């Protein structure tokens, strides 16, 4: 009896059975100390509660594990911060493919194998896909922090100055729609040079809700100042502006519903305060800003920071990593690189000692923009970075920053089905916005199971096979058995009917 | 032109005394085991697996075993018109308790003992139950098969206990082999379904056939003035009996006219103590039993003390003749329930 009770005591009662499947799953406890984590939905109740908020079908949220085809689908949400609330992600949907580039946002490991698009060493096709859900319909605040340093007066040989290009881009309908489109959004226009100044508001911060007012204020953008205090200005926005009463009255309303904050920083050069500044000397100040941004990401309702460079890249070889053929691996290396604090050499490489704007002669600013700092700030700020030259291209960058936010997403991946012959762990790690991860253990069925999903080349994930399809096995087997039972009697009757139908020797008449 | 006569036919729901008798129980067992397995699949599909993954195997084995024994109960009970008490006992004790719960528990115990006694089994099962279960699951299937055999003993009685236990275990082991092989090619859904088919089929084929006791032997006249007349050989009670055919006017079971070649006491058809039917020649005149590729002349040899006899099978024809003319008879086995 003791022997028998041991397995019962260790029975995996805590494993969740995936509805409509024999596979069990176990969402592992998150690591202590993570301010954010990825919440993986596993039960019908959880999914019902999630999708009800957005009027979506809860079936889209239910986990699917299809061992026969090697497919997994999970519903994932980024959760954390001080109040343990969801963090909506601005997932960019490609204009060409109408899909989200999954590797930009998440890293998926199936066991010890990283799942990436393309074939693995054995030639098995693998896929990763993100399908965004739960579009945030709540308020958004876009803080536009525009460089007003004198260099913005340069026209780079064209008809328009840099500031005029910026204005033109900000006034394009697609950009205005992105900022105000159908939602109760606000825009705060700021400029920076020696300091940060607000447009409109008469001394306070004006949160623009009206498109015409927005256009008026954008038209008032002008240059001024002598320096480009990029890092300090971003720090001012994070520390002072976003905590100012004019702003917090909108971002943290009385109902407790926050408005999401997106900061878009535009510059045409380097962080520069004096003629002795070199690219490498900026590393210390950048590091200080990045530490501040890291702290911010653990606060409730953290801002997402996008950076836009107007011009061309001055540090062409950044990041200082040998680029291989494997694009996904290279992206991973870049993320790891940007997760480290900057040093003069990692920020500027061989240009560490180069002056940014020397009293005489050409400096780095004459070569272009500090794309390295912008990339670092955007990475830690959870946003994206763009380097653009024309007004139209700039507008695309602003549209990207104004991307819709989604509160959860479907993560789908496909890998070698033979990996599903044993229990496996799937690890998800967010690659942008915040440092968050999740681990899920799966236990595929060993004895019996439900039919595999039907997949096609176009729809590799396939649709779960409906239960009625199980009749496709039952009816032929039972039908054959019943038929054979009848065939026994029927053949007996038929044989006798054919061979014994008449008297062999009819009696003689009379 | 075939003129259909109802007296030629066996009711379609009954089993003729042919090859069908040997596969009938297997067909019913296959049907019920597959239907029970399907019910399990539907339950899991609709409600999810509400138990520990370690119980997947015992539940799977218990459900199939229950289906196999249920098939035995249905085959036996419906053909033999059993009493309500027998039905209750067979369903509850045979099918549910022994065939279902017992088989599942036996598979569970076999599995647990295996994991306790073999460290490598426990480790392999923990890491890759899909693969390693192939090596170890046979114990669970075998133990389940043993209990399906015990369940069938409740249904059929202890007389054929070795056949029933052997058939049950063979069915369980066959299921494990089919399950193992088909898992290499198909998904667990198809593999488990084929295991249910194999278990029902093998147990049904090996455990027992529809017994002869459910059939009666008849002698039927195929020619002459009494064409179509038939007489049952055995009585209502299960004991030996004898039917005498001739034209002696008194006391015969089957009287046939003398002018149609039948002598006073021409033929005897008997049911022996062992439940076999034999034909005995009682006349010096031709008495020929014909069957496929065989003719047996049973005419009485005065130099021998006992009449010649031959076993009779369903469908044998017997020709009684006086050398001038003759009468054709047929021996046929028909289900007893056909008569009621």
Image (spheres, coloured by chain):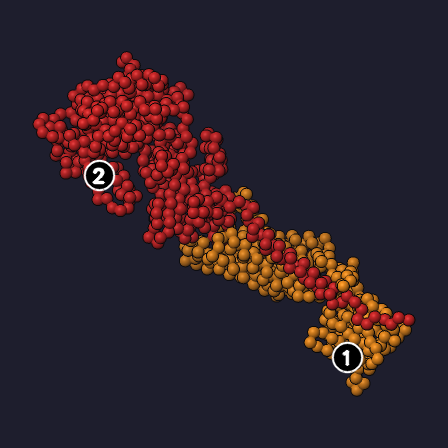
In the rendered image, the residue lying farthest to the top is A202
- Marks 2 and 1 close (CB-CB < 8 Å): no
**B73 on left or right of A59:** right
**A93 on left or right of B51:** left
> Looking at the image, is A105 positioned above or below residue A253?
below
Residue at point 79% right, 75% down?
Answer: B319
Q: Position of residue A289 (x, y in %)?
A: 23, 29
Residue at point 50% right, 42% down?
Answer: A19
Quarter of the image with the N terminus of chain B is: bottom right
> Mark 1 sits on what residue?
B298
Q: How many marks?
A: 2
Quarter of the image with the C terminus of chain B is: bottom right
Tell me the shade of chain B.
orange
Q: CA distance from mark 2 to mark 1?
A: 108 Å
Q: Position of residue A386 (x, y in %)?
A: 27, 32
Quadrant of res A65? top left
Pinpoint the chain carrying mark 2: A
Nearest the camera: A420 or B246?
B246
> Mark 2 sits on what residue?
A319
Helix, strand or loop for disc 2: loop
Can residue A484 be seen?
Answer: yes
Tell me the shade of chain A.
red
Dot 1, crowdedness within 10 Å: few (<14), some or many (≥20)? many
Nearest the camera: B58 or B7?
B7
């Amino acid at each position: 009896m003791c022997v028998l009770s041991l397995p019962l005591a260790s029975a995996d009662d805590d494993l969740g059975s995936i509805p409509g499947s024999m596979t069990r799953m176990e969402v592992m406890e998150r690591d202590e100390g993570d301010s954010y984590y990825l919440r993986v939905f596993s039960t019908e109740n959880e999914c019902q509660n999630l999708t009800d908020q957005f009027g979506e079908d809860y079936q889209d949220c239910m986990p699917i594990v299809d061992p026969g085809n090697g497919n997994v689908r999970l519903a994932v949400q980024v959760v954390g911060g001080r109040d343990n609330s969801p963090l909506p992600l601005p997932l960019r949907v490609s204009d060409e493919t109408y899909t989200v580039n999954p590797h930009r946002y998440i890293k998926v490991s199936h066991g010890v194998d990283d799942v990436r698009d393309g074939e693995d060493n054995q030639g098995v096709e693998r896929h990763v896909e993100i399908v965004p859900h739960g579009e945030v319909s709540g308020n958004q605040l876009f803080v536009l922090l525009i460089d007003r340093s004198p260099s913005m007066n340069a026209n780079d040989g064209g008809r328009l100055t840099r500031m005029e290009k910026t204005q033109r881009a900000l006034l394009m309908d697609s950009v205005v729609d992105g900022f105000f489109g159908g939602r109760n959004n606000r825009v705060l226009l700021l400029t920076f040079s020696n300091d940060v100044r607000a447009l409109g508001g008469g001394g306070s911060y004006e949160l623009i809700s009206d498109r015409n007012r927005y256009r008026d204020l954008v038209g008032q953008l002008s240059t001024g100042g002598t320096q480009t205090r990029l890092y300090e200005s971003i720090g001012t926005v994070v520390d002072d502006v976003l905590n100012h009463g004019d702003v917090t009255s909108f971002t943290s309303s009385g109902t407790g519903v926050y408005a999401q904050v997106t900061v878009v920083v535009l510059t045409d050069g380097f962080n520069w305060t004096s003629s002795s500044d070199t690219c490498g000397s900026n590393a210390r100040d950048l590091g200080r800003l990045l530490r501040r941004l890291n702290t911010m990401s653990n606060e409730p309702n953290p801002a997402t920071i996008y950076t836009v460079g107007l011009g061309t890249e001055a540090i062409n070889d950044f990041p200082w990593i040998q680029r291989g053929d494997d694009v996904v691996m290279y992206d991973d290396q870049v993320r790891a690189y940007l997760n480290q604090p900057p040093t003069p050499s990692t920020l500027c490489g061989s240009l560490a000692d180069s002056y940014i704007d020397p009293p005489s002669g050409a400096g780095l600013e004459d070569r272009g923009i500090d794309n390295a700092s912008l990339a670092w700030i955007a990475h830690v700020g959870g946003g994206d970075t763009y380097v653009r030259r024309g007004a139209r291209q700039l507008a695309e960058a602003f549209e990207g920053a104004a991307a819709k936010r989604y509160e959860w997403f479907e993560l789908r991946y496909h890998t070698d089905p033979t990996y599903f012959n044993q229990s496996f762990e799937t690890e998800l790690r967010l690659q942008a916005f915040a440092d968050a991860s999740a681990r899920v253990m799966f236990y595929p069925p060993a004895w019996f199971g439900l039919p595999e999903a039907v997949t096609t080349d176009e729809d590799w994930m396939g649709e779960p096979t409906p239960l009625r399809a199980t009749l496709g096995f039952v009816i032929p087997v039972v039908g054959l058995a019943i038929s054979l039972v009848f065939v026994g009697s029927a053949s007996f009757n038929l044989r006798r009917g054919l061979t014994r139908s008449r008297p062999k020797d009819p009696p003689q008449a009379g | 032109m075939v003129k259909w006569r109802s007296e030629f036919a066996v009711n379609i729901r009954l089993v003729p005394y042919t090859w069908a008798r040997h596969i009938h129980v297997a067909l019913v067992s296959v049907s019920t085991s597959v239907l029970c397995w399907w019910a399990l699949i539907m339950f899991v599909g609709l409600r999810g697996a509400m138990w520990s993954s370690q119980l997947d195997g015992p539940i799977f084995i218990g459900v199939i075993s229950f289906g196999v024994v249920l098939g035995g109960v249905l085959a036996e009970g419906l053909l033999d018109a059993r009493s309500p008490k027998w039905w209750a006992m067979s369903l509850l004790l045979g099918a549910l308790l022994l065939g279902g719960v017992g088989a599942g528990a036996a598979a569970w115990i076999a599995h647990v003992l295996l994991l306790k006694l073999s460290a490598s089994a426990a480790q392999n099962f923990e890491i890759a139950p899909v693969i390693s279960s192939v090596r170890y699951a046979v114990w669970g299937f075998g133990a389940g098969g043993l209990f399906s055999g015990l369940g069938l003993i409740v249904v059929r009685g202890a007389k054929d206990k070795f056949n029933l236990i052997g058939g049950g275990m063979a069915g369980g082991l066959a299921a494990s082999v089919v399950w193992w092989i088909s898992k290499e090619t198909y998904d667990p859904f198809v593999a488990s379904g084929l295991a249910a088919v194999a278990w029902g089929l093998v147990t049904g084929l090996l455990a027992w056939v529809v017994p002869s006791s459910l059939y009666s032997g008849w002698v039927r006249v195929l020619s002459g003035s009494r064409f179509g007349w038939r007489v049952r050989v055995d009585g209502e009670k299960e004991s030996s009996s004898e039917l005498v055919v001739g034209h002696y006017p008194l006391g015969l079971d089957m009287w046939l006219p003398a002018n149609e070649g039948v002598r006073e006491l021409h033929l005897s058809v008997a049911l022996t103590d062992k439940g076999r039917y034999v034909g005995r020649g009682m006349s010096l005149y031709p008495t020929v039993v014909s069957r496929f590729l065989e003719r047996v002349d049973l005419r009485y040899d005065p130099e021998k003390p006992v009449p010649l006899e031959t076993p009779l099978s369903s469908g044998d024809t017997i020709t009684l003749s006086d050398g001038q003319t003759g009468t054709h008879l047929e021996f046929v086995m028909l289900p007893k329930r056909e008569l009621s």
